[in-house]
Image (cartoon, rainbow, N blue to C red):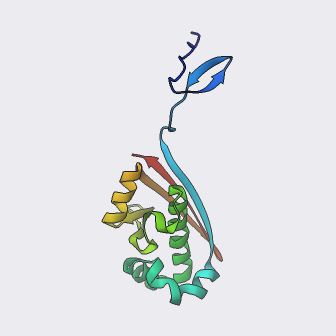
C-alpha cells in the first residue's frame, strides 16, 4: 500500500519518497530516561550539610541501619538524580529531593515514592509509572530511571 500525499496544513512533518508523512507528535511509551553516577565519598563528605535537604527521614533511618550508610545514600542520591534527568526538569522543576523517597518494594526493588504535590506535578506533565535500578560498587553508586507515559 502506497502512502497518500497529505494536503498542505495537515500537520505533515516529514517527507519520505516525496510523499508527506504524518508523524506522531509524541513517541508512545517512554516519557523519559535518566541515569546518574554518584561517588560514595562525595556523599560522605557533604552528608552533614545536605542530609535534610536531599533525603527523607525514612531514608536517613534506613541508612543508619546499614553497615555502609554513605554507600546506601549515594544510591538513593543517584536514583533521585536519574529520576530528575528522566523528567528533564532539574531539581527545582518537579520537587525538592526530600519530596522524593526511594524505598524498597516487595522484592527489594527500588521504588520512588513522591509527595502528593510532586506526584500531582508529574501527572500534569504526562508522566506515568517510574522504573528504577540502583547498583553499587564500593566507591560508586549508579542508577537508571525510565518513566512511562501516563
- Where 52 falls versus 146 (above or below)? below
Q: Position of residue 89 (x, y in %)?
A: 51, 60
Q: Which of 47 and 125 is in front in this view?
A: 125
Q: Give the image location of residue 121, x and y in percent.
A: 37, 58
Residue shown at 58%/22% (left/top)?
21
Hey, which residue is sitting farthest top in the picture?
1
Which of the 4 quarters of the picture holds residue 46? bottom right
Camera-side residue of 142 and 36 = 36
Check the image and name the residue furthest to the bottom.
48
> Residue at image x 50%, y 38%?
26
**Does residue 113 appear anywhere in the picture?**
yes
Vertical position of residue 77 compared to residue 5: above or below:
below
Q: Where is residue 122 in the image (x, y as percent from the top left)?
A: 39, 56
Quadrant placement of the N terminus: top right
Residue 145 in sight in this render: no
Please identify the residue farthest to the front as the structure is shown: 9
Residue in the foreground of this view, choosing between 65 and 87: 87
Q: Furthest residue to the left? A: 116
Query: As displayed, is residue 115 above or below residue 44?
Result: above
Query: Residue at coordinates 51% horizontally, 77% vertically from top-left?
Result: 73
Which residue is drawn at the image coordinates 41% and 61% (left, top)?
A: 107
**Image coordinates for residue 103, horizontal then vertical, percent:** 41, 68
Q: Number of marks in the image? A: 0
Amino acid at each position: 500500500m502506497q502512502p497518500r500525499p497529505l494536503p498542505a496544513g495537515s500537520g505533515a512533518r516529514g517527507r519520505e519518497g516525496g510523499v508527506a508523512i504524518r508523524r506522531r507528535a509524541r513517541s508512545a511509551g517512554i516519557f523519559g530516561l535518566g541515569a546518574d553516577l554518584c561517588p560514595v565519598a562525595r556523599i560522605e563528605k557533604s552528608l552533614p550539610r545536605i542530609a535534610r535537604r536531599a533525603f527523607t527521614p525514612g531514608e536517613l533511618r534506613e541508612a543508619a541501619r546499614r553497615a555502609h550508610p554513605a554507600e546506601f545514600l549515594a544510591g538513593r542520591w543517584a536514583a533521585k538524580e536519574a529520576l530528575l534527568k528522566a523528567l528533564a526538569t532539574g531539581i527545582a522543576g518537579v520537587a525538592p529531593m526530600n519530596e522524593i523517597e526511594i524505598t524498597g518494594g516487595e522484592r527489594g526493588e527500588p521504588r520512588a515514592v513522591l509527595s502528593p504535590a510532586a506526584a500531582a506535578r508529574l501527572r500534569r506533565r504526562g508522566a506515568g509509572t517510574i522504573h528504577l535500578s540502583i547498583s553499587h560498587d564500593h566507591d560508586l553508586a549508579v542508577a537508571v530511571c525510565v518513566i512511562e507515559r501516563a
